[in-house]
Structure formats: structure tokens, C-alpha cells
Image: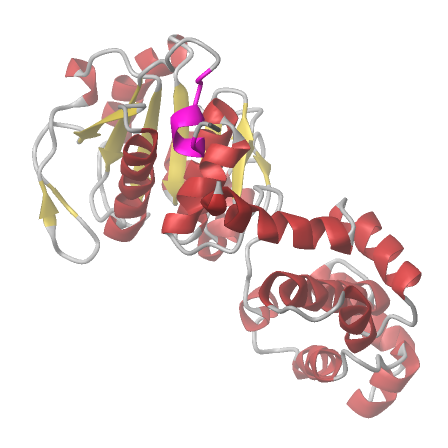
Amino acid sequence: MPIPLRKRLHADSAPPTLRRYGFLLLPRFSLSSYALAMDVLAAANDRAERKLYDTLTLSLDGARVRAANGIDLAADLAPEFAPKLDGIFVFADDLNVDFDCDLLAQQLMPFAQEGCLIAGMETASFLLARIGLLSGYRATIHWEEMARFSEAFDDVIVSSNLFEIDRQRASCAGGAATLDFMLTLIGQQHGNEFAAEISERFSLERIRPGSERQRIPLATRIGGSQPKLTEAVSLMEANIEEPLSTDDIAFYVGVSRRQLERLFKQYLNTVPSRYYLELRLNRARQLLQQTSKSIVQIGLSCGFSSGPHFSSTYRNHFGITPREERAQRALPARHGEA
């Protein structure tokens, strides 16, 4: 009789090692991101029917911490009194709070010296960089603080991705990306099938990879001073099935092609045709994940003239074919049937 999948975790190997993680809460942290991270680890323990993860809630002084929504949360202890940890996740949401960065450095440096994973959640990456823990590492931060982050720390390799895991440092944009980040860690430690099972409990279509970029509102990225650029993007979004040429877009917006290309280069760091193609591919990806339309139908509805053209373009951009994308979407359902 086949072993049920949840009974199969490490069935052919020694029992998994218990990992102990500390969640360090800074004043005005995001309670939702903290709760999501805790829930994912609790779900992993429940699904495995054994304790894979132990967690400690920490604060800089061991006292209660007030979240951004005004709720006070009790901490177990301060980091300096914690037992050996496999990872410490720092939660922060408001960079305008005045607190002691020297104390933060004093508390975290011993963990860094021991090779412990240190992760910055939401805006905590900024604080980790400030105390020198991200120098030479790839890191991300919530998009609202990205420009400030990039300008402040030229020794950090800043990305706009959902999350980054670079050796013994990690960072996550927070919010829903917290789920993807924690599930990816679990997948690395206990296998992707196990992580996919847990993702079902959170009604996720898929676990987004860290390389996927944050969805930054266009108005935020370019400000409100470029109406021609905003109008051009709106035209693209409204004409996915039958794409317009760059010349047509420039004509409808009322600028020259050269002016349009200059706007895209200056504010979006790309050319109009490339931006348009990425819009169409992202729309195709959404349809592959969320509908039962055939791959050919999806390709045509997103402006691709043939199935092979759609497939090769999709693979060149995302690294997998549309068929493989759809198979990944179906994977959690098959796991649930095991």
C-alpha cells in the first residue's frame, strides 16, 4: 500500500532535524507578516505530524512590542538570552520609529558570527544594512522604501524581487510575499512537494519564486508628472490581444516615436516594445494559472500569432514553457490526491 505523502516526509532517511527560529519584533512591526510567517511554520509541523520548527518571539529588551496596528505582543525574551538559533527573522514596518540601532547590532552580531541565517522582513532590510549585515549581499525591501534603500546603501546589491536568499542573509518584501518566502525555505529544507502541500492550506495557486518582481504601481514608479507615459501604458494594457505598434502608440498619445522611447528608457529603464511584450506575457501567465483555456487560445488572446511563437517567447522570458507552467499549477492538486 503506497505511503500517504504526509507520512512520506523523510520516510527513507533519518528524522528531520528540528530547526529553531527567532522572530525579532521591532517597534511598529507588521503583525500580518509576522502572523503569516508563524502560520506557515505551524502548518508545516501539522502536516508533517511532527515538530519540524520551533519558534521564539523576541524583542530587543525582552519586553512587549507594539505593532503598527496598535496591538501589543508579548515577547519570550531578548536575543541575547535566546538558545542557539538556526535563523533570526527581523520584522519592521516603520523606518521613522526612533530606536537604538547600536543595540540591534549588539544583539544580532553574535548570530551573524555563528553563521545563523538572518532575514529582514518588509523594511527591516534597511536596518540590517545600516548595521552592516547586508554589505556585499543581494537584498530587497518593500517597494515603498526601495528608492531610499538603494540611495542609502551602495554596498548592498538591491533588487525589486519578492524576496532574496543570499548565503546566510535573506530579505523579503513582506505582505503576501511572506508566504512565498517561508514556503520556499521549507521547500529547500524538506522538498518542494511538501511545500506545495502546505501552500494548499493557504489557497495559493503556486509558490512564487524569489526572482519574481514586486508589483509596483506605475503611478508610484514614475510619479504623476508623466501623463503621456501613463497614457501609453494604458493603451498597451487595453490592447493585449491585438498589439499596437510603437508608432501607433506614439501617434495616439501625441508624441514622436523617439520621445516615447526616451520616456520609457528614462522612467521604466526599457523600450516600449519590451515593456509591451512583458505585459502580454504576464497576462498569459495569469491565464495559464487561473483558467482552463487551451495554450493556443491563451497565446492568441495575448497577441501571439502561433502556438510555437508563444511557447518559445514564453520560455525565453520565464525559463519554462507554457505547458510546464500549467503543469506546475496542477501539481498541488495531484499532491492533495496522493
Horizontal placement of 26 versus 288: left or right?
A: left
In this view, the residue in front, 41 or 6, is: 6
Query: Could you tell me residue 22's position as x and y percent?
Result: 26, 26
Above or below residue 221? Residue 97 is: above
**Membership of 330 in magenta stretch:** no
Residue 303's place in the image compared with 334, above or below, is below
In the image, is residue 106 above or below residue 35?
A: above
**Which residue is painted at 59% across and 70% down in the image?**
218
Q: Position of residue 322 (x, y in %)?
A: 76, 55
Q: Is residue 5 magenta?
A: yes
Does residue 207 appear in this view? Answer: no
Residue positioned 48% across, 46% down in the render: 337
Can you tell which quarter of the image residue 98 is in?
Answer: top left
Q: Position of residue 220 (x, y in %)?
A: 53, 68
Res. 223 image quadrant: bottom right
State the residue at coordinates (85%, 62%). Answer: 310
Is residue 283 rendered to the left or right of residue 78?
A: right
Q: Which residues are magenta?
A: 4-11
Where is residue 60 drawn, in percent x and y?
Answer: 18, 29
> Nearest the camera: 162 or 330?
330
Residue at 74 percent of width and 81 percent of height = 232
The colour scheme applied to this rendered structure is secondary structure
Q: Residue furthest front?
A: 1
Does the rendering let one see residue 282?
yes
Nearest the eye: 16 or 139: 16
- Residue 305 lies left or right of residue 151; in this view the side is right
